[in-house]
Image: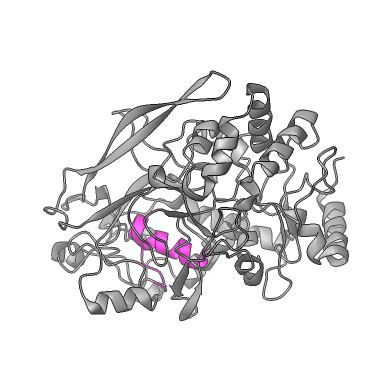
Amino acid sequence: MNLSPLILAAACSALTVAYAAEPITQPTTDFTKAEEYERYPAGAATHTKKLNKDAFSHASANMSFEREIDFKVGNGFFKRLWVTAPASTKAADGLGPLYNARSCQRCHLKDGRGHPPENSNDNAVSMFLRVSIPPQSDADRQLIETHRVKNIPDPMYGTQLQDFAIAGHNAEYRLQIDYQELPVKLADGETASLRAPTYTAADLGYGPLHAQAQLSPRIAPQMIGLGLLEAIDEQDILSQVDPDDSNNDGISGRPNLVWSLEHDKVMLGRFGHKAGESSVMEQSLGAFAGDVGISTPLHPAGSGECTAQQQDCIAAPDGNSPEYDNVEADQKVSDLVVFYAKNLAVPARRDYDDPQVLAGKKLFYESGCIGCHTPKYVTRSDDVAPEQKRQLIWPYTDLLLHDMGEGLADNRPEGAADGREWRTPPLWGIGLTPTVNGHSYYLHDGRARNLLEAILWHGGEAQAARDRVVAMSAEDRAAMLRFVESL
């Protein structure tokens, strides 16, 4: 069935009005056929366009023509290459002084997933190291406990290491990764291999890191469906919290609580690898400051993430000017980029009714994977943009923090998240990563070279589900992986 966007919007609207109560969001127990509307993981916002390298770059399918103009303008700012100040192009100057990329698009390649350097000749433009130190005083601990800050910055390097700098300044470091191969025996006699990374902040440009510095690698995540994730009702997320594992399923999801600069209060974290940001706005404008060194209304410092100990960096020319509200990306630019980020459409499912995919879906559900990867929600109807309102969506995430075991631990807390916890990432669109980005690197640091490796890295609360995958026959494992690839 291939519905037009208009018909699809009407159908999904009728569906959510009629079935917004609890039963439709309950996981299915019938795997003999596809569920109704399963092909459309983002409801009426799902796009059905050609699945090529641009598959993650389309607007919500239910967007009006007038709003699509804003989407396209936002895309232009998302791709904008910022330049050093002062420059003749005052609307685009103010890069850095320290930065990881010159544009949002340089990290989120084709609006998709970043990757670690593939060899010594490759760059790390879509990957960087976060850095922080443990609280050093009662005042530091108070800031963390009241959620006013997520981390205590390294005195010299702040909370993020930048590997580029404008002329006349030193970059902060060079990312170095060393891998060790770890064999894993599967039940059918096959063997997989995992690569365990060691990260080094090499060639430090401003002296040594703090003696207690904690480093954590991050690759840029895919951008699709963000507005819909923000439109999930907070109570639907919090209803899944089970810190004491009261149902004895081995899974005890916890929320991250973070201070919102946008709303000036503590809010539920939803975005980022450890759910450290509460909204698409905060995630986007935080990336402007940390990744590109561009000031915005939320982060007005023209020096980006330069610390008090980097005085030359602070003193460098910036692009803040009265013409643009004394920032480099003013409110209008910021709003358009956020609008773009909220409306990158999720592609339609592939092979969703194929017998092997349905068999794999059954294995995925019965192995316990949906204990964290919650299949579906109905989005809110209040305080939500029209594209995201009352949609039945299938992101396969609970947006909560889970202990993923020692193997994936970065040993760096972030807000309420400890050094072993990560937010459950959405799975929609994951099977199109090779199509969009030309690679198949997964997890927060891209260490997994395929989906099976990503599963085999699961530990902690996911250990039991991971062990069930190891125990599968080759045929069953192939079916389950094909289901995940179809998302």
User: In the picture provided, is 389 more to the left or to the right than 263?
Assistant: right
Determine which quarter of the picture holds residue 23. bottom right
| Residue 405 vs residue 126, the one in the foreground | 405
Q: Which residues are magenta?
A: 280-298
- Magenta segment includes 446: no
Where is residue 378 shown, x and y percent of the image?
74, 62
Q: Who's the residue at 47% across and 65% down the image? A: 277
Where is residue 128 shown, x and y percent of the image?
34, 47
Q: Who's the residue at 37% across and 71% down the image? A: 299
- Magenta segment includes 283: yes
| Residue 421 vs residue 62, the one in the foreground | 421
Where is residue 267 shown, x and y percent of the image?
51, 74
The answer to whether residue 100 shows anywhere in this view is: no
User: In the picture provided, is 319 more to the left or to the right than 4?
Assistant: left
Seen in the picture, residue 70 relative to 207 is either above or below; the reply is below
Q: Who's the residue at 40% across and 76% down the image? A: 325
Q: Quadrant of the N terminus?
A: top right
Characterize the magenta stretch by its predominant secondary structure.
helix
Determine which quarter of the picture holds residue 155. bottom left
Seen in the picture, residue 474 relative to 431 is either above or below; the reply is above
Going by the picture, which residue comes out furthest to the top?
Answer: 189
